Image (tube, rainbow, N blue to C red):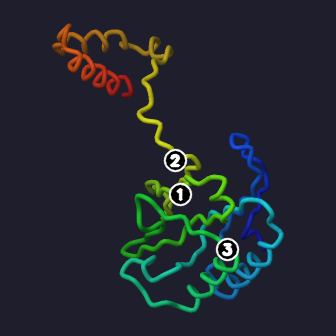
């Protein structure tokens, strides 16, 4: 498809899962876009493993995907027909509403679609929108295992000892707070504060 799509077939070793990931960069031109949608519907029949399609689709699925709304267009209808024809699931976007913005315009044109069997093997797959930096597109983060294991334990890094004034910083910190030898709550609080100080 003239560099508009990259198929990668492989195995997630952590899950022992064979899968297909198709990275999409859809054209802006409506005719070329329709060719891509038709291609995906045809290609779907050759996919025999869980399928994931992340990318810039340069199209919205509904009027709600555009800031200020819009009417349902023929382009939206064709896009929706493609997604339905491929039997794909549109992962909800957490944290942000739009994935692209420029000036006052904003829309959700970057998405990640997955097949039903992908969701069967990776049922906690969750999509997040990350902060934008130099691009007008927001990076997407697909979390395959969204199980909440609780807070991560604090780990001391040996390399901190070679940082100038690290020992002095620790000494100054302990000297600046009052920690009761019997106050467990105060001690926990102090360690949390020290953890944050060490991160910086």
Q: Is residue 54 above or below residue 190?
A: below
Q: What x and y, as percent, mark residue 161?
A: 45, 11
Which of the marked residues, 2 or 3, is nearer the chain's N terminus? 3
Which of the marked residues, 1 or 2, is nearer the chain's N terminus? 1
Q: What x and y, as percent, mark residue 120?
A: 65, 57
Reading the image, the residue beneath label 2 is 146
Q: Residue 185's image quarter?
A: top left
Marks 2 and 3, how far apart at CA: 24 Å
Q: What x and y, as percent, mark residue 102?
A: 43, 71
Circle on res. 119: none
* Label 2: element kind: loop
Reading the image, the residue beneath label 3 is 87
Pick the front one: 143 or 27: 143
* Label 3: element kind: loop
Reading the image, the residue beneath label 1 is 140
Q: Residue 23's image quarter?
A: bottom right
Query: Crowdedness of circle 2 by 10 Å Cα count: few (<14), some, many (20+)?
Result: few
Q: Mark 1 touching mark 3, by CB under 8 A?
A: no
């Amino acid at each position: 498809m003239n560099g508009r799509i990259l198929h990668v077939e492989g195995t997630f070793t952590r899950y022992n899962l064979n899968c297909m990931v198709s990275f999409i960069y859809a054209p802006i031109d409506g005719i070329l876009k329709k060719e891509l949608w038709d291609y995906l519907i045809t290609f779907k029949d050759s996919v025999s493993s869980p399928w994931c399609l992340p990318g810039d689709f340069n199209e919205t699925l509904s009027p709600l995907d555009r800031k200020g709304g819009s009417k349902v267009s023929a382009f939206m209808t064709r896009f929706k027909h493609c997604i339905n024809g491929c039997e794909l699931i549109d992962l909800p976007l957490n944290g942000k509403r739009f994935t692209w913005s420029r000036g006052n315009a904003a829309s959700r044109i970057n998405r990640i679609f997955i097949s039903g069997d992908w969701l069967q093997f990776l049922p906690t797959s969750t999509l997040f929108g990350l902060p934008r930096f130099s691009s007008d597109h927001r990076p997407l983060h697909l979390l395959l295992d969204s199980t909440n294991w609780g807070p991560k334990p604090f780990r001391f890094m040996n390399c901190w000892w070679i940082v100038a004034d690290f020992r002095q910083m620790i000494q100054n910190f302990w000297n600046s707070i009052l920690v009761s030898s019997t106050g467990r709550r105060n001690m926990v609080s102090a360690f949390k504060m020290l953890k944050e100080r060490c991160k910086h």
